[in-house]
Amino acid sequence: MKRILLSCLLVLVAVVPAWAGESLLFLTDQDFAPYSMIVAGQPSGIDVDVLSEAAKRSGLDLTIKAVPLKSMLDAIRNGSCDGAVSLFRSPDREQFALFMEAVPVHLSDYVLFTKVGNRIPFAEYQDLKGKVIGYVGGVDLGPDFEAARKQGDMLVKEYRDLRDMVAGLLGGEIDAFAGNIDVTYYRLKDMGLTSTIVYLPRKILTGKPSYAVLSRASALKGKDSVAQKLEKALDDMHKDGTYNTLARHYLIRF
């Protein structure tokens, strides 16, 4: 009887996920309000609240830290974190990140912002010939934008963050900049610039999904199980209205 009980215990131990009891470290972009940011020294925002709730429902002990985007990408690449709260998918990033593609954390629309009075036609990228367009380093703006940059349809200037990019536009360094509509307007409202900077009608990207990811290089075991649990929780949160409830704390449109 003792041998049977011992065997049962060994089987139970064997099926307990390797991450049970571990604290998982996920990073988030500190300059992507209202989706992710730092408030009173703590990570905050829609994505942070949503993934924290998904982890709670999944029984995962999750710690989230907000860092610059480039630092986040480096950490995912070298495995010094277990994953990231949300990240746009690209062939390059798939080399070092496992995307939880079943359910996006959020969807983004990207446009070109410019100063009021700047009449810049933008039906196609060739219309931007000779124009200097700003973007935040590390942001993936899709294959069409990248192809236009390589072909020289426009000049591209990289910035550290959105605040520097806005200053570059107001200072005449660039003619326009690429930005997420929600993120940029959230920042412009804080800066009192919503009547000074507007966006052009054509969108660069529409409904671009951003996913939670796991680092391929991290020491975390049972990654497939972790991903499945978080994906299920995120799906449930969309279906039961929790996602909209959390997002509405930051954006009225939800």
Image (spheres, rainbow, N blue to C red):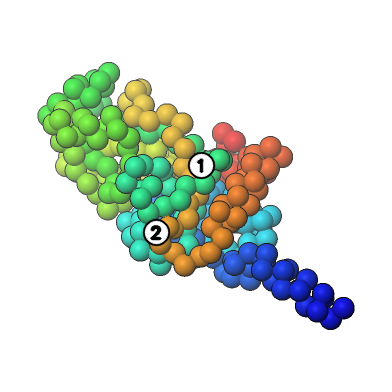
Tell me residue 101's x, y (percent): 51, 42
Q: Is residue 192 above or below residue 71?
A: above
In this view, the residue in front, 62 or 101, is 101
Tell me residue 196's x, y (percent): 32, 35
Residue labelled with disc 1 = 101
- Is residue 193 at all visible to an observer of this figure? no
Give the residue at x 60% y 55%: 225
* Secondary structure of the residue carrying numbered label 2: helix
Tell me residue 254's x, y (percent): 59, 36
Give the residue at x 56% y 34%: 253
Position of residue 178 in the picture relative to residue 27 (left or right): left
Q: Earlier in the sequence, mark 2 or mark 1?
A: 2
Q: Quadrant of residue 29?
A: bottom left
Q: Quadrant of residue 102?
A: top right
- Is residue 147 at all visible to an observer of this figure? yes
Total residue callouts: 2
Q: Which mark is residue 76?
A: 2
Position of residue 19 in the picture relative to residue 1 (left or right): left
Circle 1 crowding by C-alpha within 10 Å: few under 14, some 14–19, many from 20: some
